[in-house]
């Protein structure tokens, strides 16, 4: 189940091209800066977001990345939704070394290891939603 968005809407980035992935990275970096994030934590979270956004572009047929900032906690939450075919076996897709695209297969598992919390919902034929939280 996808976590409910928390915080104030900071931005929403359509994900169609590699340029959009760069925009997503910049938006999340700026969001982390508003909370005074340590450089190492910002780098980890932005790296995870980059991986998830790139997956939405490459495998998900495009989508949207929405960024929320919660200054009370403090934390940054992203919700990345694509309109792709979905992931047939989520548990297998989270394993390092598994890839349907001939890559190293470390994207989803790597992203999960870089963030405070991670959830993935995927429905065959309806797409995938990844929710991640980073702390400053």
Image: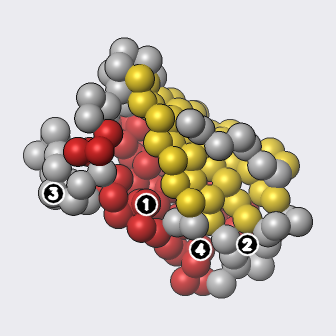
Is label 2 in a helix, a strand or a loop? helix
Which numbered disc, 3 or 4, marks the residue closer to the eye? 3
- Name the residue carrying label 3: 97
Q: Residue at x 78, y 49 (%)?
A: 6
Q: Which residue is mark 1?
A: 112
Circles 3 and 1: CB atoms closer than 8 Å: no
Residue 16 in the image: state x and y as whole percent: 46, 32
Q: Which of pointers 2 and 3 indicates the residue nearer the eye?
A: 3
Which of the two discs, 4 and 1, labels the residue nearer the N terminus?
4
Closer to the camera in the image, 48 or 122? 122
Q: CA distance from mark 2 to mark 3?
A: 33 Å
* Residue ID at (27%, 28%): 88
Label 1: how many Cα within 10 Å (few below 14, some 14–19, many 20+): some
* Mark positioned earlier in the residue sequence (3 or 4): 4
Q: Which residue is mark 2?
A: 33
Q: Between marks 3 and 4, how big is the CA–CA gap?
A: 26 Å
Q: Taking the image as drawn, is residue 68 in sight?
A: yes
The mark nearer the N terminus, 2 or 3, is: 2
């Amino acid at each position: 189940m996808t976590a409910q968005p928390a915080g104030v809407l900071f931005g929403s980035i359509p994900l169609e091209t590699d340029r959009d992935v760069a925009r997503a990275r910049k938006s999340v970096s700026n969001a982390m800066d508003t909370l005074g994030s340590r450089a190492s934590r910002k780098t980890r979270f932005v790296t995870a977001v980059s991986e998830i956004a790139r997956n939405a572009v490459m495998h998900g047929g495009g989508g949207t990345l929405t960024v929320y900032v919660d200054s009370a906690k403090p934390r940054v939450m992203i919700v990345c939704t694509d309109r792709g075919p979905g992931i047939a076996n989520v548990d297998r897709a989270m394993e390092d070394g598994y890839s349907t695209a001939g890559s190293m297969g470390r994207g989803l598992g790597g992203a999960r290891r870089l963030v405070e919390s991670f959830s993935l919902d995927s429905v065959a034929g309806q797409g995938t939603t990844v929710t991640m939280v980073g702390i400053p």
